[in-house]
């Protein structure tokens, strides 16, 4: 690692919270090897871009980020990792370029050191294909967010192979850390002042494939860990959100009444085309099960519009189902053609104009659902984890059931309340309409 001492590096991340947690870990490892993080205006010897490839737009943003950093630091070693696989033959960014795929991410510091010590021609990498049933190595990551919460990676990879998705190819098969190691990371986050930890991964409900442990066992162990006052489950497949998990969260010390559950489509035919592992009947029953145990839960739901084969009639069917669901918010994504996926074999392409129109309809529905959820709790007092806002005189935070709250300066009473959980009475909407105004009790 001597080749890295005294070098300067810049880090850039695109995509999900899992990527941000992994970049933070890579940055710490690089600093431990003697690398300094370059400040604004300083030239860098190494540029590391953690990419995203969930859509064509994400691919484009990944390329743009690499291009931008290459222009700014033309003599630096350009390192790309993450889910986007850059064109390598010939290498788009010259010979001073290194691509580290998902299976090698745990060795990224060593690979960078080797490349700097012995410059070679452009690195050869695997093609977009899984090598047998190799799950790869689980690389731990626990990173502090911009403000108050930590993101703990508990699982990586996916075994599901939905027809529209490249993630199993980019990140490999499902794998995870041990419960003991993850509890230690959570306790370390608490020692660093963390009050809230978000559990992240690609398919976290599939936890246990490499250790023989269960997701419910992980939740129970984390709930008993000292220091952390709040946990949130970032996203979990409906078929993996068991009644046992829901019941435990309803009674736990620290798991919040907040779930993020991907639906992807409210049409059974589109779900079949996607190779999802449930139908709308199952999904609807799962939502009711959550609300039976946790009536005040915030339920966020992912939806994809414009999938190949999604006719006007099927979209109308999906929208009607989504309208009927008692959820809190929809996160809408437009289907994007991904090379190597089975979805490309499905007839019936949806035009960009139709995708946009359908997306707008779901967004309008989502806004209605979100306002309904917020309005229910006006006048109630809920615990809020406060954090500084970019606007002077205001603090923001989220209730246990994920209502965004704005507390004005006069309510802070001169106390240092950043990263503190306080009881807040929820009032009317703020001027922007993105939070409820709160009054500290």
Image (cartoon, grey):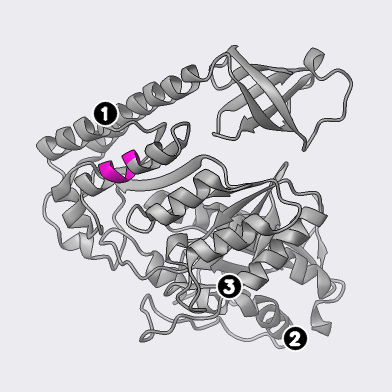
- Whole-angstrom CA distance, mark 2 to mark 3, is 32 Å
Please tell me which residue lies in front, 278 or 334.
278
Could you tell me which residue is drawn at 79 percent across and 19 percent down?
393
Residue 124 part of the magenta segment: no
Magenta range: 284-288
Q: Are marks 2 and 3 in contact (CB under 8 Å)?
A: no
Could you tell me which residue is drawn at 38 percent across and 85 percent down?
131
Q: Write down the residue under mark 3.
A: 177
- Whole-angstrom CA distance, mark 1 to mark 3, is 38 Å
- Tell me if residue 87 can be seen: no
Dot 2 falls on a residue whose secondary structure is helix
* Quadrant containing the N terminus in the rendered view: bottom right
* Quadrant containing the C terminus in the rendered view: top right
Q: Position of residue 205 (x, y in %)?
A: 44, 61
Could you tell me which residue is drawn at 73 percent across and 81 percent down?
113
226 on left or right of 97: right
- Whole-angstrom CA distance, mark 2 to mark 1, is 59 Å
Please tell me which residue lies in front, 150 or 187.
187
Could you tell me which residue is drawn at 59 percent across and 27 percent down?
404
Q: Are marks 1 and 3 in contact (CB under 8 Å)?
A: no
Query: What mark, if any, has residue 323 been given in the picture?
Result: 1
Res 417 quadrant in image: top right
Going from the N terminus, do you reach mark 1 or mark 3 first?
A: 3
């Amino acid at each position: 690692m001597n080749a890295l001492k005294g070098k300067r590096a810049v880090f850039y991340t695109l995509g999900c919270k899992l990527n941000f947690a992994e970049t933070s870990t890579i940055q710490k490892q690089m600093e431990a090897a003697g690398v300094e993080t370059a400040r604004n205006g300083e030239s860098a010897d190494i540029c590391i871009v953690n990419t995203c490839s969930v859509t064509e737009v994400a691919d484009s943003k990944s390329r743009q980020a690499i291009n931008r950093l290459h222009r700014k630091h033309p003599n630096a070693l350009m390192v790309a990792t993450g889910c986007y696989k850059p064109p390598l033959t010939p290498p788009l960014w010259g010979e001073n370029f290194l691509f580290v795929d998902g299976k090698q991410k745990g060795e990224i510091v060593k690979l960078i050191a080797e490349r700097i010590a012995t410059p070679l021609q452009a690195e050869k990498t695997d093609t977009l294909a899984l090598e047998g049933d190799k799950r790869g190595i689980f690389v731990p990551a626990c990173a502090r967010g911009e403000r108050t919460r930590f993101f703990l990676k508990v699982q990586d990879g996916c075994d599901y192979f939905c027809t529209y998705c490249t993630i199993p190819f980019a990140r490999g098969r499902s794998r995870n850390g041990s419960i003991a190691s993850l509890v230690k990371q959570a306790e370390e986050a608490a020692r660093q002042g963390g009050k809230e930890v978000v559990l992240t991964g690609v398919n976290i409900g599939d936890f246990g494939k490499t250790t023989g442990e269960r997701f419910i066992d992980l939740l129970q162990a984390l709930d008993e860990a000292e220091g952390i006052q709040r946990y949130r489950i970032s996203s979990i497949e409906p078929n993996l959100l068991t009644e046992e998990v829901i019941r435990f969260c309803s009674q736990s010390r620290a798991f919040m009444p907040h779930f993020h559950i991907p639906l992807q489509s409210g049409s059974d035919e589109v779900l079949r085309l996607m190779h999802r592992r449930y139908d709308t009947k199952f999904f609807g029953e799962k939502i009711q099960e959550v609300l039976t145990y946790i009536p005040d839960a915030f339920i966020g739901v992912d939806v994809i519009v414009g999938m190949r084969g999604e006719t006007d009639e099927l979209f109308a069917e999906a929208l009607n189902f989504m309208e009927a669901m008692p959820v809190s918010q929809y996160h809408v994504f437009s289907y994007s053609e991904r090379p190597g996926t089975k979805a490309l074999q499905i007839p019936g392409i949806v035009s960009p104009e139709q995708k946009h129109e359908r997306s707008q309809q779901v967004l309008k529905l989502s806004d209605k659902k979100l306002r309904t959820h917020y309005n229910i709790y006006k006048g109630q007092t809920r615990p809020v984890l406060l954090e500084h806002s970019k606007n002077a005189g205001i603090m923001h935070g989220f209730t246990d059931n994920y209502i965004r709250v704005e507390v004005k300066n006069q309510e802070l009473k001169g106390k240092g309340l950043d990263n503190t959980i306080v009881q807040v009475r929820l009032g009317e909407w703020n001027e922007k309409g993105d939070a409820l105004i709160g009054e500290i009790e």
